Amino acid sequence: MSKKTWTAVDDYIVSSLFEADPVLDAVLAANRDQGLPAIDVSAAQGKLLSLLVRIRGARRVLEIGTLGGYSTIWMARGLPADGKVVTLELDPHHARVARSNFERAGVSDRIDLRIGPALQSLAVLSGENAGLFDLVFIDADKPNNPNYLDWAMKLSRPGTVIVCDNVIRDGAVVDEDGGDANVEGARAAFSFIGGNKRLDGTAIQTVGAKGYDGFAIAIVE
């Protein structure tokens, strides 16, 4: 098996199960044109996030790591009309592209984009006492996974779903002594979820257009 095959299967999934979506196609094109790294979730993964929002019946979603807003739009589309995604982005250029994409997709009214280091934004968000979240999607700098998970717990209630992206790392997550900070961040996510009695979680290995990786998914009890 190869990435070529995985990508072909991803294309088959999209062509078989999804309607044509020129808006999301334009979002990805805008991200490319503006020089953003091609690390958005795949279409199939984005649809999964949207379905998780709907399955959970979420009204408030927290996303840590916006990039160009592709995953944000998927989740915003899964919300009811009065729902909100609070999304955190470090890079001002990425945030500008994302804002434009939100307008293009017609979901700006459902999205609160905050710019700056995520740990600072999370502290500010906590101090606002604006309410807890129903779903948290973590897809930012991997070494901070345990810090983001800690904040996710503080901002969650029983029943909150937490999704942490990129935790398999081409299988390198099993390497205890690799010295790669991103792999160590993935392992830290597993340690955090496995060691927290308030979390019940698992992980899903994925292959597709984005290669070999996966999600950790947990529910707060």
Image: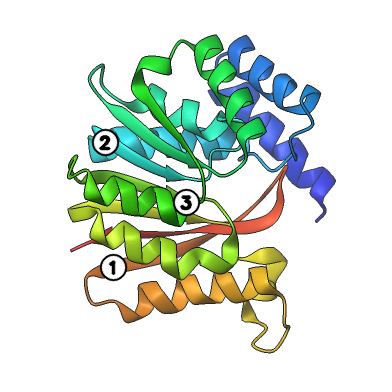
- The residue to which callout 2 is attached is 60
- Above or below: residue 96 compared with residue 139: above
Are the residues flagged by discs 2 and 3 in contact, CB closer than 8 Å? no
Q: Is residue 181 left or right of residue 7?
A: left
Q: CA distance from mark 2 to mark 3?
A: 18 Å
Residue 167 in sight here: no
Residue at horizontal 44 percent and vertical 57 percent from the top: 119
- The quadrant holding residue 95 is top right
Viewer-nearest of discs 1 and 2 = 2
Viewer-nearest of discs 1 and 3 = 3
Label at residue 200: 1
- The residue to which callout 3 is attached is 118
Looking at the rendering, in which quadrant would you find the C terminus?
bottom left
Q: Which of the two residues, 176 or 203, is positioned nearer the viewer here?
A: 176
Mark nearer the N terminus (1 vs 3): 3
Q: CA distance from mark 1 to mark 3?
A: 25 Å
Viewer-nearest of discs 2 and 3 = 3
